[in-house]
Image (cartoon, rainbow, N blue to C red):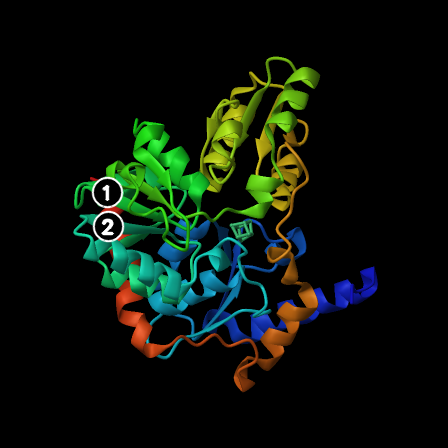
Amino acid sequence: MIPTPSGKKDISARIEQIRQRYGKDLVILAHHYQTDSIVSHVDFSGDSLELARRIPDISARHIVFCGVFFMAESACLLARPGQQVYLPDHKAGCRMANMARQNDVERILTVLKDSGRSVVPLAYVNSSLAVKAVVGRFGGAVCTSSNAVRMMEWALARADSVLFLPDQNLGMNTADLLGIPGSQQFLIDIAGKTLQSPEARSARILLWPGYCPTHALGMLPSHVQEFRRAHPGCRVLVHPECTPDVVDLVDGAGSTAYLIKETEKAALSGREKVLCIGTEYHLVNRLTKRFAGTIDVRPLVKATCPNMEKITLPKLLATLEGMEQGEGAVTVDESLKSPARQTLVRMLEHCKPAQAK
Ligand code: SF4
């Protein structure tokens, strides 16, 4: 049920009271794609990489994660003993992550290994804990959209080929950036029927057939063309979960951190009047409001993520009120923790921010 404005005010006040009561013992984190009403109650918002980096430094007993399920699972992996991670709605899954199932990933990697191929799996962080565990056992790592290029180089330095999953578009866009020709990229089928084809055998990048419906189905070349017709000469930037035919048409593609930074730079320089951003709408709308009067930030389309929107103020409040009784608590299978954690640690180690001198 959507709360009335006065009900919303009441819920917000109760959330703030609980935050004050817990003080340093409670940290609330949110992904950039959360609604403004959620973001106004958090200690920190960021993209997947920024949030993952935060977890090891958090000492609070309770960590409430406003995002989707795989993000809360990753937080569990990086949390300290005695800390508890919560997600206000366990049905907030990632549709892309659900396109790669543990058994399928394990079967495909086993077939590849048994055929004598030298292959390292690289999983986008948008994957389940169980899939990360399989990837960890096969010597792989995870990556985010911020560091996909560095991590694909990492993987290619270890094997002749990489199985990139689950996002075919991030995989193709990253391989393109590394100059790997399309003839060396191969979209596999989950049944594995084409794995032994000459094209698959000679490919350096094997791509899992997953995608993000919000970016890949919601943002089309025709949207870019329409924007360009309406705003000649204005820049268009998109997230690399968009399809390569969209990325080919725009002026830049990068993670949410990149999109935010580019908007900040454009606002500061004052050289651009209009900037178009193609990613989840709540983030773009926040940028529009933040830079109103400086630069006109337009969404490519108003595409939202229905699962991110499952996290609402009433659910956040219910989690905060029920934490001591385990409301919203996320637990992960102990046997999966170690191999899954390895994939995150490999990424965090390889992509450590440069130390200040
Ligand atoms: S926007 Fe796409 S990738 Fe992100 S959580 Fe939603 S479905 Fe998953």
Q: Residues within 10 Å of mark 2 (few under 14, many from 20)?
A: many
Which residue is identified by label 2? 120
Residue 203 location in percent, x, y? 28, 37
Say how many tags the image has: 2
Residue 356: name its quadrant: top left
Contact (Cβ within 8 Å) of mark 2 with mark 1: yes
Instruction: State which quarter of the image contains the N terminus.
Output: bottom right
Viewer-proximal residue among 56 and 243: 243
Indicate the quadrant where residue 289 lies: top right
Q: Position of residue 26 (x, y in %)?
A: 49, 71
Residue visible at 35% across and 59% down in the picture: 105
> Is residue 134 at all visible to an observer of this figure?
yes
- Residue carrying label 1: 161
- Residue in the image at 51% along x and 35% along y: 243
Residue at the spot 31% in from the left edge and 50% down from the top edge: 122
Residue type beneath disc 2: Val
- Residue at mark 1: C-beta within 8 A of ligand 1: no
| Label 1 environment density (alpha carbons within 10 Å; few <14, some 14–19, many ≥20) | many
Which part of the image, by quadrant, shows the C terminus?
top left
